Image: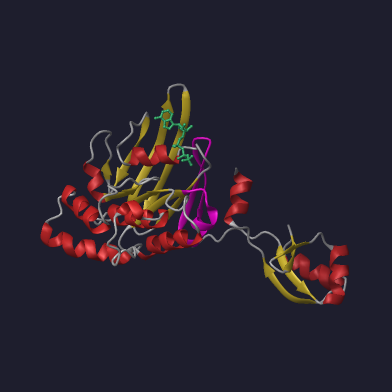
């Protein structure tokens, strides 16, 4: 089942066209990485999914229900972590989540257990200090807890890791991955290694539309060239016969099929120790298509 469907979205601000034709869908329990450079329209798209921004043309469905601008009915299925989450700095995490639970109309008997489970999930159970003293990473983790308070079917995160150090990024990615069995996640970013770590699928937004979608679980990125290790005495010969570059402690030979490689190695009496098919990184694909 598709938890999110975005069909042919168009959006302009005055005479500036941002989205020309954005379409994609996200299946239940998927993590979808929404990639795009600065100003490509990731936040704009997310705000339209939330019904916070008027759609010029196209439509959005969340859990099969149409999203209407100005109506927040479909947001009962959605949790949202904005790029810069704002909190009441004089509260502690527990107090803040209690307030969020009240606003979301979660009954008191249910909210206490939910809040404790969320604090545990984001590693803030033992923190009683006020939010004003929190690090960026702690605020972002509290932001995830806040977004999950209503047990959403869909969690939308706008650049959740961009402002964080490596540990903070790892924490957030770990949390998003751990909730996958209960919540479908879409997160925008331009940090491609983050996307690669946790996403099932990715969509690359460029020039107002999704220029490429990749299924990172099933369609492994297409092979491109091979990685070879040879005896020290064969290195010079390898360099003469092929155009090679060093990569990951091996020799990378681009644009060659395994069969052709074996044939040429044999012809030149080069004895490989190890051969493997090289695959481009998501960054390679991104740079190629953009
Ligand atoms: N309310 C608005 N009025 C006018 N222009 C806007 C408005 N909101 C966004 N834009 C413009 O739309 C374009 C896309 O902005 P958006 O914030 O959606 O991009 P983004 O992909 O999220 O970028 P970033 O990675 O920098 O956050 C930008 O050029 C931005 O200036």
Q: Position of residue 90 (x, y in %)?
A: 26, 50
Q: Going 52% across and 40% down the picture, which residue do you hit?
A: 38
What is the x, y in percent for residue 139?
36, 54
- Image quadrant containing the C terminus: top right
Q: How many marks?
A: 0
Compared across the picture, whether 267 is left or right of 137 comes to: right
Q: Is residue 68 left or right of residue 169?
A: left
Say which of 17 and 264 sits in front: 17
Could you tell me which residue is drawn at 37 percent across and 34 percent down? 58
Q: Choose top left, top right, bottom left or bottom right for residue 235.
A: bottom right
Residue 216 in sight: no
Q: Is residue 199 magenta?
A: yes
| Residue 187 at x, y percent in the picture | 42, 51
Judge whether 81 appears above or below 48 on screen.
below
Residue 66: tell me if it is visible.
yes
Q: Is residue 266 located in the magenta-colored stretch of the structure?
A: no
Q: Quadrant of residue 224?
A: bottom right
| Quadrant (top left, top right, bottom left, bottom right) of the N terminus | bottom left
Front in this rendered view, residue 108 or 201: 108
Q: Residue furthest top?
A: 15
The structure residue drawn at horizontal position 29% and vertical position 49%, both measured from the top left corner, is 89
Direction from residue 268 to residue 186 in the image, left or right: left
Ligand 1: which quarter?
A: top left
Residue shown at 58%/58% (left/top)?
Answer: 221
Question: What's drawn in magenta, residue-wise?
Answer: 189-216
Query: Would you say 165 lies left or right of 289 here?
Result: left
Depth check: give the residue in front, 178 or 138.
138
Where does residue 131 sit, x and y in percent of width and height? 31, 53
Specify the color scheme. Answer: secondary structure
């Amino acid at each position: 089942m598709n938890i999110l469907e975005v069909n042919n979205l168009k959006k302009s601000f005055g005479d500036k066209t941002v989205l020309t034709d954005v379409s994609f869908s996200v299946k239940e329990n998927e993590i979808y990485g929404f990639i795009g450079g600065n100003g490509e329209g990731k936040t704009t798209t997310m705000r339209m999914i939330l019904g916070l921004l008027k759609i010029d043309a196209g439509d959005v469905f969340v859990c099969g229900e149409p999203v209407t601008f100005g109506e927040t009915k479909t947001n009962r299925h959605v949790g949202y972590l904005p790029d810069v989450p704002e909190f009441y700095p004089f509260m502690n995490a527990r107090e803040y989540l209690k307030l969020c639970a009240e606003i979301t109309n979660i009954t008191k008997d249910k909210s206490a257990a939910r809040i404790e489970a969320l604090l545990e999930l984001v590693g803030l159970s033992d923190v009683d200090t006020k939010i004003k003293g929190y690090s960026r990473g702690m605020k972002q983790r509290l932001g995830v807890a806040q977004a999950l308070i209503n047990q959403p079917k869909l969690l939308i995160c706008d650049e959740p890791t961009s402002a964080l150090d490596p540990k903070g990024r790892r924490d957030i990615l770990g949390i998003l991955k751990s909730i996958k069995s209960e919540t479908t996640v879409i997160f925008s970013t331009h940090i491609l290694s983050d996307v690669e770590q946790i996403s099932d699928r990715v969509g690359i937004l460029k020039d107002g539309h999704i220029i490429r979608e990749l299924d990172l679980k099933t369609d492994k990125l297409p092979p491109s060239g091979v990685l070879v290790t040879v005896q020290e005495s064969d290195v010079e010969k390898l360099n003469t016969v092929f155009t090679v570059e060093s990569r990951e402690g091996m020799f990378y030979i681009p644009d060659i099929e395994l069969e052709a490689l074996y044939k040429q190695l044999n012809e030149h009496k080069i004895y490989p120790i190890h051969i493997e098919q090289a695959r481009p990184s998501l960054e390679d694909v991104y740079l190629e298509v953009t």
